Image: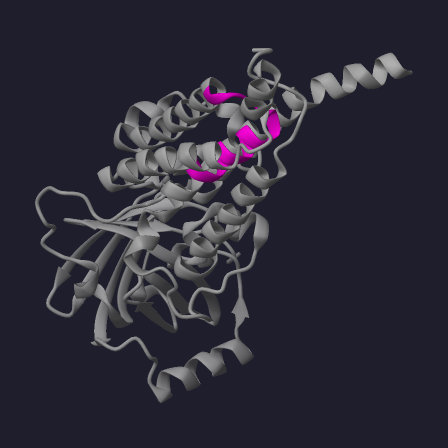
Amino acid sequence: MKSIISNRVNILQVLIGIAVLLVGSLVYLIDRTPYQTYFIYRIANISLYNALPNLFGHIGNSLPAFIHVFSFILITAGFIFCNKKGYLIICLSWFLIDCVFELGQKFNTWSSKIIPDWFAGIPFLENTENYFLQGTFDFIDLTAIAFGTVIAYFVLLTTNKGGYHEESKKRVY
Amino acid sequence: MKKARKGFIKTLPYLCLVGVIALGLMTIVGTGGGGGGGGGGGAPTITLNDLVGTYNLTAFTVAYDDGLTITQEDVDSYSGTMLIMPDGSMSQTVETNGFVVSFQGTILSVVTDTLRIFTPECTYDLGFELDGNVLTTFFLSGTCGVNWSEVDVWEKTSASTSLSKADNLAFEEAEKIEETIPGGAVGSIWNFLP
């Protein structure tokens, strides 16, 4: 673990991750009805649905799946400043997390059963059951997750200048 | 002091890691996921497009768990309007004996004879039958914690979703003189009567 984590932050990676995440939130703010999205109607309480024209069209269906995995890979990697192996571990971890949640929508009777009762009433956690029961499993979402993971890995490599990998090289030569 | 600072700096990446993972999981659950297009399988016989329009309430039957049954014949006055929009959003306003209940929700899916309806308070299944212009809805006791079953009969007055001028006036009048109470279905009105 120590070889993966160092106490330096790659600000560029974190900023790219946050910026892309903000773009993704526009899908929920503009293209979807507020009642479809828990954090819009329960937390943010704002919606531009019908106030602005549809921004993303059909891409908006699977764009969040792509953006989520992409953004969180970059933010995670940016915070923990790691080498190539570490990047790979981060990418695979977020890929698996997103895939598990997506597959949970397909096998929703099983996944809704394992949700503990104490989730009820706790912000965000209370929506877990709805997420599995109301969410739509889609192979295109899985493809978007895989695509986002691969793109994120390459972005990590290209934004690693001066990072852990580069420093290791400097030390060798 | 220096040692403590060093220790904090050492643990900071781990704290950030935990925070980012928590935020990542929260955003998955909080946004409801990607929500792609419709899946495969047999196409339902009735689609949302078939239901889009403006409806008037023509009859209702409310059967409370304690045995009391109320129909439109048991009230002095009743009226109701329901709008189902092409994007699945719906609104319903019902007045009986001067009490008004209304709710807004979203139709998440239309599968054969069941509508899955989402409201901030509760997501539930509503049985339905569509026969020409007549839409009959079946609301089961226990759904969203209510203690009654309800059958509402709606007649589609228009495939358009904009209220007619007369309906708008009726809505405005109702808002002025009638009392609005919590709840969305006809049955919730009777819980407020002595």
Q: Would you say the magenta stretch is mainly helix, strand or loop?
A: helix
Q: Which segment did they paint magenta?
A: A69-84
Q: State the residue at coordinates (38%, 65%).
A: B91
Whether B111 is among the magenta residues is: no
- Percent across and percent down for residue B107 are 31, 55
Q: Is residue B121 above or below residue A34?
A: above
- Percent across and percent down for residue A135 are 33, 40
In the displayed structure image, the side of residue B20 where residue B36 appears, left or right: left
Residue B169 visible at all = yes
**Quadrant in the picture for residue B96:** bottom left
| Residue at the extreme bottom of the image, as rendered | B165
- Percent across and percent down for residue A39 are 52, 47
Q: Is residue A18 above or below residue B101?
A: above
Q: Is residue A113 above or below residue B182?
A: above
Q: Is residue A41 above or below residue B168?
A: above
Q: State the residue at coordinates (67%, 26%).
A: A8
- Percent across and percent down for residue B132 are 10, 68
| Residue at the extreme right of the image, as rendered | B1
Q: State the residue at coordinates (55%, 16%).
A: A4
**Quadrant in the picture for residue B171:** bottom left
In the displayed structure image, the side of residue B137 where residue B29 appears, left or right: right
